[in-house]
Image (cartoon, coloured by chain):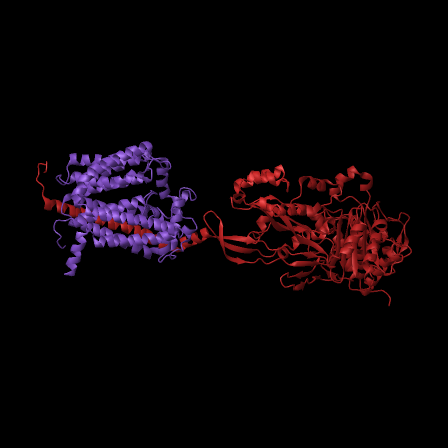
Amino acid sequence: MSFGRRLREPSREAQLFARRIVIAALGMVVLIALLLSRLVYLQLVHHDHFTTLAQENRLKVLPIAPTRGLIYSSDGVLLADNRASFSLEVVPEKAGDLSAALAQLQAYVSVGPELLARLKSELRQRRRFDSIAVKDNLTAQEVAVFSANRHSFPGFGIAGRLARYYPLGAQTVSAVGYVGRISEEELKRIDISNYSGTMHIGKEGVERFYEAQLHGEVGYQQVEVNAQGRILRVVESQAPVPGRNLYLSIDTRLQDAALKTLNGLTGAIVAIEPATGSVLAFVSNPAFDPNDFVNGISAALYKTLRDAPERPMFNRALLGLYPPGSTIKPVMAAGALEYGLRERGTPTWCPGWLQLPGVTHKYRCWQKSGHGTVDLLRSIAESCDVYYYSLARDMGIDRMHNLLSEFGMGRTTGIDLPGELAGLVPSREWKRRARKLPWFPGETLINGIGQGFMLTTPLQLAQVAAILANRGRVLEPHLVREFENPQNGRRSAFTPVERPAVSITKPEAWVAVVEGMHEVVQGARGTARATALGATYQYAGKTGTAQLFTIAQDKRIKVQDITQRLRDHALFISFAPLERPELALGIIVENGESGSHTAAPIARTLFDVYFATRRPSDAPG
Amino acid sequence: MLRVNSRQLWGRLHIDPSLVGGVLMLCAIGLVVLFSAADQSTDIVLKQGARMGLGLGLMFAVAQVSPARLARWAPGLYLIGTGLLVVTALIGTGRGAHRWLEFGFLRFQPSEIMKLATPLTVAWFLRDKLLPPRLPVIGTVLLLVALPAALIAEQPDLGTAVLVAAAGLFVLFFAGISWRIIGLAVVVGVLSAPIAWYSLHGYQRQRILTMLDPAADPLGAGYHIIQASIAVGSGGWSGKGWLNGTQSHLEFLPEHATDFIFAVYCEEFGLLGVLVLLSAYLLVLVRGVKIALGAQDPFGRLMAASLTFTLFTYVFVNMGMVLGQLPVVGVPLPLISYGGTSLVTLLTSLGILMSIQTHRRFLADF
């Protein structure tokens, strides 16, 4: 059989074969060991790691946004609501021929070309079984018409969401603020996981200051998904914790009245309940409708608001800086008595001007002919500048700085609103630092009548009025009175924060100052003498007129409308009743010319509104 | 007495009980895993069961044929198979590759025939040659192996080509080819590796690169390997339990009923289950080795050894692929993966083993 030269040797061949089998079997053992070592590595050594990866594959966590807390006024009016907003959505994989369906849809819900373009780009990015919004903010009619014809649009549906709505719109925006879509910068400072289901965040006002309380805590649903991301079942879920409801101290009647008194004017009004620090009205006029901002304002509307000369988006009550003018005179007077610089009856001669020794410049009184002999009460009632030039000279800038600071000027009041400005009470140290100049004696005089470097906000003016009304007690103003847990209705009150009282310790000082302020509105020669006529309550006030030279923002406006824009700002601080005061006011009317003519009557109107439904604490019998 | 009788009975029926026992065990495991891997589809399990029945029938049938007759059929089978490969190259079907031939109701891959025809033919050719084989013989064998392997590689189906070539070359190895020649072949292989690299298709190169670094493209080329590793690793020591594998049931694991069914098995039954599975394979493999050692003529010996180690090669290549140790090639896990063609081929080859064992002239004890 064999053609080889050697003879076949079966036993030798069998031996050779057996050796090869052994070698191959050894190879097999080595390879099996290789497989086993890999199995041990994967299944034993790194088991935990791969278990985690498998879980991450399988489970997805979907956020459930908490319901934002509601905001009410003290008289129970809803100021910030969550309203259902409806959008038309489509699940592409269920819709069949989408373009045909969209064409047919136009008969019921009009979908404009820009919406179609947006939809087209979303279709490319999203998965076919995800719901995509076709149109947001459907009208009630669109919802009804579509719902009636729903059966002819498989895959389409209406989805409801909650959107913020401010029923009073512009009336409360200065205090309540508004929410808007979360911006890039906000994403950096918030807890992203808590906001994973939330689209909006407080941008201004109470909405922003109490964001943490209003927002609540996100809930979640842990779902099992397959490789395509389709949800198969809910494994676990935790309900979100809704945000707290806020009850503000804002009184909508007073707020509304305040806004109306400023109708056609530019200005701000802040009303504070002195005993508690509760802010009852917080108005900046003109204002804007916050509802325009909730879902992104249109560029055109934003431009209109931004470029309007009255600057409606500028919250004057909180951020407007004005020289306080004569409104600081009661404070100066109180200091004079406390420091023993003047007695109540100490006369000062007002010839219409005051000169410092060795200086030719005359510091003039607003009353060019002079007030003659002026005591402390008259100095307040008639707002004699010379009295306060002389007092300021005697008091000196250092004591003035301390005194005015104690009354809250030049420092933030601590109100529960974001971005409050401190204003400015000058001092030697400030001038050295800011202006790199020494303090000049003449500047003490000018600042003694609230001019010069001094700047205050309308909120600070109201706070000065409240401190005077409190005879020196200082309570931080606040807008929130109560928090409510919406789940169990339990309410917790906001505890007012009290600051150290001002260091006016002599009771007769308060008596004299309040009498002087009463004279302003009641006295025969008071600067606002006509305004208290016929009032069923007694009140105190102080007018002020701020000369226009500080507000840089107004520069451009002045050029446009010089005659009106150059008029002085009118200021008024006031409280009522005289004993146990219930309402303190800070009022500024820009370009209102004089406090007595424009601002003081506003205070009277507001007191009337306020006491129309309440018995003033000083009412007889 | 009974013992001898039963052995004689099995011998007369040309059935090797140990081998059949191991095969049935593997088939049972296969159907159990498949039920889970195929998302509890009884249809698929029944279909696979039917194929197993067909394959087992074919295995028993082939066992009735004597090795001598099988050897005589070998050249004809080889010629038919090679011819069909040429036809497939011309008119074959398949996604991106010409692998399938369709004859009305019948649809099959001619390369499957060559998995058996190649080693059969080589063993037939070597049956009367002086062993260890000398160079002209070796040259002829290499040609016999290279022709079908090249045709299959052209389809392109590199995995099957390598396995067909391996089946033929195993015969040469067991025929006692000199180590010097093997060493030379290794050297030539290493030196020509760069040339081979450039002759690979882009996707084939990609698969090798992916095996080396699956994380480079986790959602693309590396996806299979990463997801398979997660499935295997998360199975741990005792597995997640039957029907509880999340990787396969949630469709993260691709090809989980076919080429990657081992990952499903590892995920659900853990390392413990793998040891059971490997034991079942070893039962068959050890039996195959015994049959090879007990074979009385060169053809039976070479054929039995080649078939046994080819079976192991399939197991190793599939598991190595699932475990990320080998590139992704389309090699099913023998008797476990869903699919008919390779199952039938494999059971047929085990029928040949039984034929070799039960057609010995003396049914002596050993």
Task: Give the image location of residue A109, x and y in percent.
Answer: 64, 42
Which chain is purple in the picture?
B
Q: Where, quadrant-wise, is the C terminus of chain A in this rendering? A: bottom right
Q: Determine whether, in the image, residue B19 is placed left or right of residue A173.
A: left
In this view, which residue lies farthest toward the top? Answer: B90
Q: Is residue A271 visible?
A: yes
Total residue callouts? 0
Q: Position of residue A515 (x, y in %)?
A: 85, 60
Asked where in the image residue A71 lies, by quadrant, the reply is: bottom right
Q: Residue furthest front?
A: B104
Q: Nearer the viewer, residue B335 or B137?
A: B335
In the shown orientation, is residue B69 left or right of residue B239? left
Q: Which chain is in red here?
A: A
Image coordinates of residue A570 in percent, x first then y, are 82, 49
Report the side of B42 relative to A296 (left or right). left
Give me the residue at 39% from left, 51% from top.
B41
* The quarter of the displayed image where residue A463 is located: bottom right
Q: Where is residue A531 in the image (x, y as percent from the top left)?
A: 87, 54
Q: Which of A111 and A146 is in front in this view?
A: A146
Asked whether residue A392 is in view, the answer is: no
Quarter of the image that includes the N terminus of chain A: top left
A359 or A259, nearer to the observer: A259
- Of residues A293 and A533, the one nearer the viewer is A293
